[in-house]
Amino acid sequence: MKFDADDQASIKAWTDQAMAWIRADIKAGYVPATVRSFIELHDHVDANDYTDVPWGDEAPPTPSDPDGMRYIIAVQESITAILSEGKSL
């Protein structure tokens, strides 16, 4: 199942917020700038906290909801794509 344009916009916004938090943690020294994947973040912090993005009036996606899990995985993959480039840190 593919994400529609609204879903993709939500995933991008969620990823952008998570990356802002990750960059702040890198700057604060909690996470090394050499981290290149979402999984590696867990070596230094509870990386799942980065996916706790405020959703306004909507309920956030949750792992127990199959569609919610799809969102979470998409955001984690987007974060890994950005981190693997190493340019945006």
Image: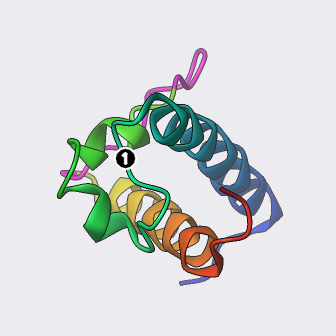
Name the residue furthest top.
Answer: 57
Quarter-of-image position of residue 57: top right
Query: Residue, x 55% and y 32% (percent of image)?
Result: 24
Dot 1 falls on a residue whose secondary structure is loop
Residue 71 in percent (x, y) is at 47, 59
Indicate the position of residue 33 as horizontal and vertical percent values: 49, 58
Residue 80's place in the image compared with 76, above or below, is below
In the image, 15 versus 88, the foreground residue is: 88
For residue 26, side relative to residue 31 (left or right): right
The residue drawn where x is 45% and y is 35% is 25
Q: Overall secondary structure of the magenta stretch? A: loop
Q: How crowded is mark 1: few (under 14 residues within 10 Å), some or many (20 or more)?
A: some
Q: Position of residue 12 (x, y in %)?
A: 71, 55
Q: In which quarter of the image is residue 35?
A: bottom left
Picture quadrant where residue 8 is located: bottom right
Please provide percent x and percent y for residue 60.
Answer: 43, 33
Q: Mark 1 points at which residue?
A: 31
Is 17 displayed left or right of 77 in the figure?
right
Q: Which residue is drawn at 73% across and 60% down?
A: 88
With respect to residue 8, does 51 lie above or below?
above
Residue 61 within the magenta-colored segment of the rendering: yes
Q: In which quarter of the image is the C terminus?
A: bottom right
Residue 53 among magenta residues: no
Q: Residue at x 21, y 56 (%)?
A: 42
- Residues rendered magenta in the picture: 54-64
Q: Residue furthest bottom?
A: 1
| Residue type of the residue flagged with mark 1 | Val
